[in-house]
Image (cartoon, rainbow, N blue to C red):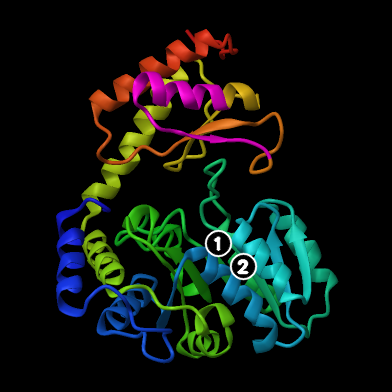
């Protein structure tokens, strides 16, 4: 979407109409019609009453989670062990009681919830798609626990907005669970192709965050041209189900072809395609060689982002990666895997 004609035209139009900068912070002079329209579109995307723009999804997570102590005195936050660094930082700066449950371990989460004071306010923070392994959070099961123990739900949909659901609302929309989420977090980068982040939820919750989160209050707002581009991207992807289907197809094809080569692919059914190399030097070397020798850019993921021994190349094929690009990548990986003398899985049949 960062190259889409509708996005580029919207950005050019906003620059011509109002110039480059936003004019200040949101609560003073940095709110334009573009900001208000985008927040309305994002609220609608998630079936929420309201949304609030931040300069990044990191700042949205950090700013919102760290502010909850003011809004809910005595709040206990239950955070998945593999939550994004922005959520970890927000929970850390929150400074109140926190519990870390083992990744996607609903039984462990239940134990932690049951051990705490039933009268204490509670919030469960988790993700819909975890970016390193590409696995899905058990949204329905976590919502069931939230209902049982009277907890709020905070769902990071950064790796899913635009890509999942009938209108791109994320995994919670795909699974008809949006009505069970209290606060959504999302990005205007990644699928939407521009820049910025947001949270969405009830009107009262968003107004409270707007009024108390320092990262929102004291940050210059997103430039109108950026907001206009994101607005065009969100509106387009709400209508374009075909591109989401093509996106999933491209990821599925790549995983199948890499498995046929015996490469160790992690496949949880999402669009993220991690290939385990298992050695930091080889991971970096293969990433460099893919770029220098084949003109292919792929991210090397090493410790501390992932545990030692699970270093990987992480592929995220897009709808514009067609058969030509797929063939080039598969041939390059096949050659480099042999060059580095890395192990392959035994092929069935």
Residue 347 at least partly seen: no
Q: Secondary structure at mark 2?
A: helix
Instruction: Looking at the picture, tell me which residue is in the foreground, 294 or 144.
Output: 294
Q: Which residues are magenta?
A: 284-303
Question: Where is mark 1, residue-wise?
Answer: 140
Task: Please indicate whether residue 210 sits to the left or right of residue 146 in the image.
Answer: left
Q: Quadrant of residue 53?
A: bottom left
Left or right for 85, reference 191 = right
Can you give x and y, in whole percent of width and height, for residue 1 in the image?
A: 26, 53
Dot 2 corresponds to which residue? 144
Callout 2 touching callout 1 (CB < 8 Å): yes
| Residue 186 seen in the current view | yes
Q: Residue at x 79, y 81 (%)?
A: 118
Q: Mark 2 packing: few (<14 Cα in 10 Å), some, or many (20+)?
A: few
Return the x and y of residue 44 as percentages of the image width and height.
33, 76
| Residue at (27, 80) in percent of width and height | 37
Location of residue 90 by image quarter: bottom right
Residue 19 is marked as none
Depth check: 298 or 271 in front?
298
Measure how far apart labels 2 and 1 are at the Cα level.
Answer: 6 Å
């Amino acid at each position: 979407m960062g190259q889409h004609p509708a996005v580029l035209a919207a950005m050019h139009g906003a620059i011509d109409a109002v110039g480059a900068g936003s004019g200040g912070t949101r609560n003073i002079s940095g709110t334009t019609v573009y900001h208000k329209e985008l927040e309305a579109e994002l609220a609608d995307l998630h079936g929420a009453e309201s949304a609030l723009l931040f300069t990044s999804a990191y700042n949205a997570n950090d700013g919102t989670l760290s502010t909850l102590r003011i809004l809910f005195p005595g709040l206990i936050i239950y955070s998945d062990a593999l939550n994004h660094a922005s959520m970890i930082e927000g929970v850390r700066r929150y400074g109140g009681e926190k519990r870390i449950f083992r990744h996607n371990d609903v039984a462990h989460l239940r134990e932690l919830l049951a051990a705490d004071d039933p009268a204490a306010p509670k919030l469960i923070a988790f993700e819909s798609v975890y970016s390193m392994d590409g696995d899905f959070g058990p949204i329905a099961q976590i919502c069931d626990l939230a209902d049982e123990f009277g907890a709020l739900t905070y769902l990071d949909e950064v790796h899913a907005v635009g890509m999942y659901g009938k209108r791109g609302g994320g995994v919670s929309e795909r699974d008809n669970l949006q009505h069970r989420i209290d606060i959504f977090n999302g990005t205007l980068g990644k699928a939407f192709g521009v820049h910025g982040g947001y949270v969405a939820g009830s009107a009262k919750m968003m107004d409270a965050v707007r009024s108390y989160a320092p990262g929102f209050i004291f940050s210059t707002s997103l430039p109108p041209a950026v907001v206009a581009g994101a607005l065009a991207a969100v509106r387009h992807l709400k209508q374009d189900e075909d591109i989401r289907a093509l996106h999933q197809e491209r990821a599925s094809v790549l995983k199948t072809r890499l498995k046929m080569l015996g490469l160790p692919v992690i496949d949880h059914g999402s669009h993220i395609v991690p290939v385990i190399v298992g050695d930091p030097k080889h991971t970096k070397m293969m990433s460099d060689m893919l770029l220098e020798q084949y003109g292919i850019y792929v991210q090397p993921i090493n410790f501390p982002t992932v545990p030692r021994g699970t270093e990987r190349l992480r592929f995220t094929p897009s709808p514009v990666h067609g058969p030509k690009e797929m063939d080039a990548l598969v041939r390059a990986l096949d050659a480099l895997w042999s060059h580095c003398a890395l192990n392959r899985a035994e092929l069935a049949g």
